[in-house]
Each structure stands twice: as C-alpha cells, then as structure tokens.
Amino acid sequence: MKVTVELQKNVHFKGVSGTGHEISMDGPPDFGGENNGARPMETLLIGMGGCASFDVVHILRKRRLDVSDCVAEIEAERAETEPKVFTKIHLHFKVSGAKLTEKAVGKAVELSAEKYCSASIMLGKTADITHSFEIMD
C-alpha cells in the first residue's frame, strides 16, 4: 500500500491513495489552516469508521441478511499532552435492514472489533475503544 501527501498551501495538504482517490486535509486556524479539509486526526477516525463499517456490513451480508444502511458515529478523546494520541474512542453503529436481529448485529460488531478491523485494533493500542449499536426501522 502506498499513498502520497502533498503540500498545497500553508498547512493544507492533498492526500492521494494508491488507487487515485484524493483527501483534503488542513490544520487548525491557529497553525495557519483555512478550513480547506478535515484535520489529519479526523481522517484517522474516518478511516477507522470506514474499516469497521465495512466489516459490519460485509459480515451481515455474508450471513445473507439484508443491510440497507449503516452509519457509524464516532466520538474520541485525546491526551492533553504531546503526543496527543487518542485515549478513548466510542463507535456507535446505526444499522438498517430487513429482519436484522440484536444477536446478528452484535456479533458483527464484536467480530469487527476483535478480529477484522485493522484500524480499530491498531488504534486500540493507545485508546480504550468501546462499541454500541442500534437497529433502525
């Protein structure tokens, strides 16, 4: 896997994935940022949410369950001092679909957290990560 990150202006950067997709990142205004993109630490949480959501949907669909929507809401806390690593992260999944059960969704969330989501497992080395979910109508 390979990506590039290129300075655009001040502290605004363009990230380009090996598959050619772009992400815009910018620092906070007190460091010269102009709100031209997500903060780099936000992109870590977005990546984690994407990884975990992919797992949950994939696991449920592999069990032949109909998933029509999956939203991951993520809240995180960071250390007060440098390096300001994540210390607490909570993922809350809102999953929609026909005939979804608490047991099936709970198992999918558990498997993602404990076995499949590389991003969650990696960030779990510094942060206490918790999960919850609800099945939406």
Image (cartoon, grey):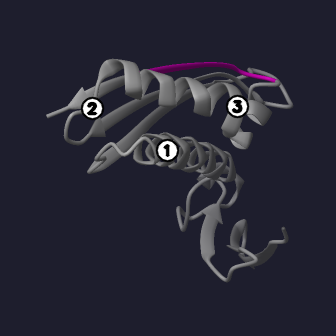
Q: Which comes sooner in the sequence, label 1 or label 2? A: 1
* Nearer to us in this view, 88 or 12: 88
The structure residue drawn at horizontal position 49% and vertical position 23%, both measured from the top left corner, is 107
Three-letter amino acid code at the position of disc 1: Ser
The structure residue drawn at horizontal position 80% and vertical position 72%, both measured from the top left corner, is 3
The structure residue drawn at horizontal position 72% and vertical position 65%, both measured from the top left corner, is 11
| Quadrant containing the C terminus in the rendered view | top left
Q: Kindly give the residue lying farthest to the bottom in the view shown.
A: 20
Which residue has dot 1 on it?
Answer: 53
Q: Is residue 121 left or right of residue 57?
A: right
Judged by its main secondary structure, the magenta piece is strand
Across and down, in percent, residue 18 comes to 76, 77
Q: Which comes sooner in the sequence, label 3 or label 1? A: 1
Across and down, in percent, residue 126 comes to 80, 23
Q: Which mark is residue 115?
A: 3
Separation of marks 3 and 1 at Cα, in angstroms:
14 Å
The structure residue drawn at horizontal position 43% and vertical position 41%, both measured from the top left corner, is 63
Q: Secondary structure at mark 3?
A: helix
Please state the extent of the stretch shown in magenta in the rendering.
126-132
Number of residues whose C-alpha sits closer than 10 Å to that of mark 3, classed few (under 14), some (14–19) or many (20 or more): few
Across and down, in percent, residue 84 comes to 78, 30
Q: Nearer the viewer, mark 1 or mark 2?
A: 2
Number of residues whose C-alpha sits closer than 10 Å to that of mark 1, classed few (under 14), some (14–19) or many (20 or more): many
Number of residues whose C-alpha sits closer than 10 Å to that of mark 2, classed few (under 14), some (14–19) or many (20 or more): some
Residue 3, relative to residue 69: is it above or below? below
* Nearer to us in this view, 33 or 48: 48
Which residue has dot 2 on it?
Answer: 100
Residue 98, relative to residue 80: is it above or below? below
